[in-house]
Image (cartoon, rainbow, N blue to C red):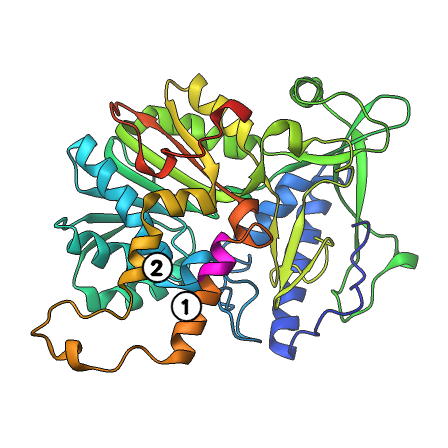
Amino acid sequence: MTSSSPPSGLPLPDPDSLGHSHDVARHLAAAIDATPDGFLPFEQWMHLALYAPGLGYYAAGSAKFGGDLPTGDFTTAPELTPLFGQTLAQQVAQILGIAGSVQVLEFGAGSGALASAVIPALRRLGIEPEYQILEVSADLRQRQQARLAPLQANVVWLDSLPQAFRGCVLANEVLDAMPATLFRWDEDGSLAELGVRLCPATEQASDQAMPRGFKLAGRPASNALRAAVSARMPALPGYCSEINLQAEAWISQMGNWLERGAALLIDYGFPQREYYHPQRAEGTLMCHFRHHTHTQPLIYPGLQDITTHVDFTAMADAALAAGLGVYGYTSQARFLMNAGLPALLAHQGQPESQHSPAAHAAPIAAAAHASMLSAINKLTAESEMGELFKVLAIGRGLDQPLQGFMRGDRRDRL
């Protein structure tokens, strides 16, 4: 995580992708040159690498989501099986009923896979949703529009946060992609903020990575950053990690516009005491490139995803400070089980009516059934996504327990 030299084992980008990465690298180099001291805080690097208009990973046109090599960089739960969205819809329906609304707002809808499962599932539950999507990527917005068009649903894409909202908010793997601040505790007990500098000419990386080399560097942390980090963990010499103040600010803003309802925040992460565990001394930052995971955020800018795990205690604290309630926190596996996954799974392949043609059709193909069970295992197994991913529900004005947290609620661990 110290330089822009490409690690061994990663596939080489094709020439067009490599050319795009060089363009992004030049944009980032210009941003560094424009700073007074040649130091770009990592939070700003991550923002530009992911979201710079027309250049960043989420703002350009590369394939991001997909399980088939080499078309994507990672696979999210909605892409694994529509049962994820169908199960989530059970909880969405309860929230909408309590809030007296049919509005659903999804942040960062990706390929549109979640919406394409949730909308029909809500319809089967007797709800015609008013589905809103806030997507920062113009390219992904176009893909979502194409995917959702056949549903002929009431879907609106927003350009900014709503002024007021009642209903259910969905954010699946959104918080992890919000730019984070990196820090390091030095041997003398001082705190350093990490950022990016240009390598000297003698340390330039090979052209396969980018035209100018980058390296991580530190500078003394501000008093505000030191206070924020010190409130969460003791000084541990040599310890590196992250703090996501942008994600906390996003939660705080929700307190201004969410009038009644709940947000379901689904992501990989830990409560604070586990996040800053002494044994997690290298932090949680991860990069995803062509289904390879590594820890070098400075290589192939614009071509790879950069993420950090979520500190769910910090998210819950930000919600409470903004006047919102915390309605549940549990593992993804427990949430899906509580929300009705077993019943939906049992229904797969069963005819809807004894008089329907499907009643006389053969059961679903063995290969398709095996694929579905494999996806469910990945979503729920403790060794897969079932335990690493958590679900946090925050909101306002709900007067009933949420079904997804009826058993195994872990709010006491936050």
Q: How far apart, in angstroms, are the residues tagged by discs 2 and 1? A: 9 Å
Quarter the C terminus occupies: top right
Q: Amino acid at mark 2?
A: Leu
Say above or below: 407 vs 148.
Answer: above
Graded by Cα atoms within 10 Å as few (under 14), some (14 to 19) or many (20 or more), the crowding at tag 1 reads some
**Is there any visible trace of residue 158 in the rendered image?**
no
Magenta run includes residue 30: no
Relative height, residue 95 to residue 285 (above, below) = above
74 or 15, nearer to the observer: 74
Residue where numbered disc 1 is placed: 372
Chain-order first, disc 2 or disc 1: 2
For image coordinates 34% across by 47% down, the residue present is 106
Counting other residues with Cα less than 10 Å from the Cα at mark 2, is it few (<14), some (14-19), or many (20 or more)?
A: many
Q: Which residues are magenta?
A: 376-380
Number of marks drawn: 2
Q: Amino acid at mark 1?
A: Met
Identify the image quadrant of residue 102.
top left
Question: Taking 243 as reference, is 31 above or below it?
Answer: below
Q: Are marks 2 and 1 in contact (CB under 8 Å)?
A: yes
At x 62%, y 52%, the residue is 306
Is residue 145 toward the left or the right of residue 409 in the image? left
Q: Which residue is mark 2?
A: 83
